Image (cartoon, rainbow, N blue to C red):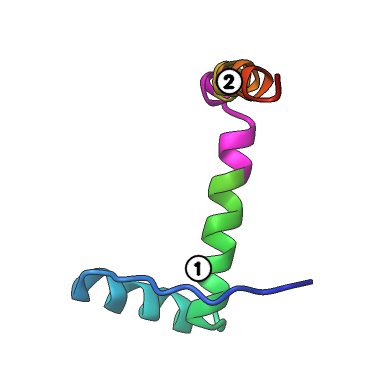
Amino acid sequence: MEVRSMTLRLPDEQARELEAVARVDETTVSDAVRTAIGDHIEARRNDREFQARIRRILDEERAVLERLAK
């Protein structure tokens, strides 16, 4: 699996809360963030309105790409 480094800027209070949660959960801040991101993505996958917006955007982009391919 390839990995990519990212920088995340958080307000100080939120960063302290994240560090505390990770410490209590006996995990790293990085693992806590990865878990939260994974949970967020899964929630979006299960959101019907989000999925409808994806389909709309795909249809719009498909039309543009097909025009460009001619």
Label 1 belongs to which residue? 33
In the image, the segment drawn in magenta is 42-53
Dominant SS in magenta: helix
The C terminus - image quarter: top right
Which residue is found at the position 20% from the left and 76% from the top?
Answer: 12
Quarter location, residue 26: bottom right
The N terminus - image quarter: bottom right
Seen from the viewer's position, the closer of residues 59 and 41 is 59
- Lateral position of residue 2 relative to residue 62, left or right: right
Quarter location, residue 56: top right
- Lateral position of residue 36 relative to residue 1, left or right: left
Residue 61 % position (x, y): 58, 24
Whether residue 44 is in magenta: the answer is yes
Is residue 39 depicted above or below 27 in this figure?
A: above
* Comes first in the chain, label 2 or label 1: 1
Residue farthest to the front, as pictured: 70
Is residue 19 depicted above or below 47 in this figure?
A: below
- Lateral position of residue 42 relative to residue 6, left or right: right
Mark 2 element type: helix
Seen from the viewer's position, the closer of residues 55 and 59 is 59
Which residue is found at the position 28% from the left and 78% from the top?
Answer: 16
Which residue is found at the position 63% from the left and 43% from the top?
Answer: 42
Is residue 70 depicted above or below 33 in this figure?
A: above
Which residue is found at the position 63% from the left and 17% from the top?
Answer: 67
Please, what is the three-letter code of the amino acid marked with disc 2? Val
Whether residue 35 is in magenta: the answer is no
Label 2 belongs to which residue? 64
Residue 55 % position (x, y): 62, 19
Residue 59 % position (x, y): 62, 16
